[in-house]
Image (cartoon, grey):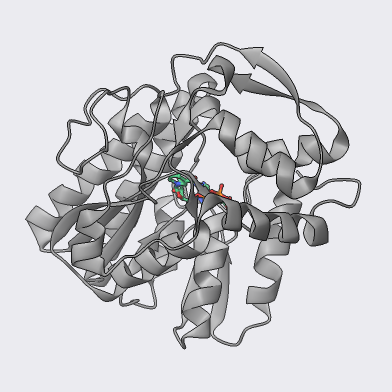
Amino acid sequence: MTGAAGFIGSTLSEALLARGDEVVGLDNFNDYYSPARKRANVAPLLAHPRFRLIEGDFSDAAIAQDGVAWKPDAIAHIGAMGSVRYSVDNPALFVRANIVGTAHLLEAGRKAGVPHFIFASTSSVYGQTDKIPFVETDPTDRPLAPYPASKKAGEVMGHAYHNMHGMSFTALRFFNVYGPKGRPDMMPYIVTDSLVRGKEFTLFDAGSMRRDWTFVGDIIEGVIAAIDRPLGYEIINLGRGEPIDMNEFVRIAEQITGKSAIIRAAPAPPSEPKVTFAKVDKARRLLGYNPRVSVREGLGRFWEWYQKEAMAPPALG
Ligand SMILES: NC(=O)c1ccc[n+]([C@@H]2O[C@H](COP(=O)([O-])OP(=O)(O)OC[C@H]3O[C@@H](n4cnc5c(N)ncnc54)[C@H](O)[C@@H]3O)[C@@H](O)[C@H]2O)c1
């Protein structure tokens, strides 16, 4: 599992260990957001006898090979540089981590005979489109920023490996994932943290942008089902399928925290799609996926975690 110290990777590692799997995690603890938070994510895993951590950068071919030297049943490639906005000013970093890194992991997996590769892709490959909900067969060749471009490259490189070497490759397009251990650069954290601290935060396009917020527990169930089912080559949406606009999102956060938002209005940058909206029929059919957690319930669970782990000053991240 790459990205094992990150938000989704550490949550997935916990779930895999809990059902009896052995997990080797690979992460470079980069400082895009606080490495201390990633250390906190990984600390309970390190105490587990069936977890091992390799600290290193998978865009280094030798590190990618170390990660698969023990011949796992599957590679879950969850690690990445994951921010649309950060990619705008740092495109080469995203090419290196997300394209070169994925290529090294695919090649390392092939050499080690790993039969199955899971790739964390993103709803942002759909770009700016009026065709909703997003279906896996929709065009995805007009990315809005280097981040989705790099993820699209990973999806298609996976096809090359499936074609050349028969490796099973499943790309899962995650939609706006949130929940406990959530990333400090994403809106659920930013909004909550700003509400608690009485700070201003930026809301694009008067809060009209719609996002298909998907609780991390639902995502993890989808990823584990994908790990357990080699499917040849497939691309599958993992979302909730019920987008809400940002005004409603902020309203729910205000109700949960009991605080009022101080909003700075700004136009959305061209890297931001107006909407994300998953059609999840394929995931239901192929993976038995069934997202259950509403935004209100999921934000409530995030709030519980935030009060315990992130609220005390100085804030991590
Ligand atoms: N969170 C979301 O809403 C969301 C949505 C769509 C897709 N995704 C994808 O899901 C995956 C996990 O996202 P997350 O939200 O947990 O992000 P995260 O940043 O919390 O986790 C990513 C982890 O990968 C590690 N990493 C990055 N580059 C690395 C490298 N070169 N070598 C080794 N480790 C490296 C980071 O240190 C981090 O711990 C990513 O691939 C992301 O693109 C996330």
Asked whether, in this view, residue 159 is left or right of residue 243, the answer is: left
How many numbered discs? Answer: 0
Tell me if I can see residue 1 in this picture: no
Residue 257 relative to residue 231: left or right: right
Q: Residue at x 65, y 66 (%)?
A: 42
Image location of residue 153, percent across then percent down: 27, 37
Q: Dividing the image into 4 quarters, which one contains the N terminus?
A: bottom left
* x and y percentages locating residue 111 in the rendered image: 24, 65
Residue 310 left/right relative to 299? right
| Residue located at (27% from left, 38% from top) | 133
Residue 144, quarter of picture: top left
Q: Say which quadrant the C terminus sits in.
A: top right
Q: Is residue 57 above or below residue 206?
A: below
Which residue is the extreme one toward the right?
313
User: Relative to 224, does residue 137 appear above or below in the rendering?
Assistant: above
Residue 33, image x, y percentages? 67, 42
Observer-nearest of 256 and 19: 256
Q: Residue at x 30, y 77 (%)?
A: 73
- Which residue sits furthest top? 267
Q: Is 99 rendered above or below residue 55?
A: above
Q: Quadrant of residue 21?
A: bottom left
58 or 143: nearer the eye? 143
Q: Nearer the viewer, residue 296 or 187?
A: 296
* Residue at screen point 26% across, 38% down: 134
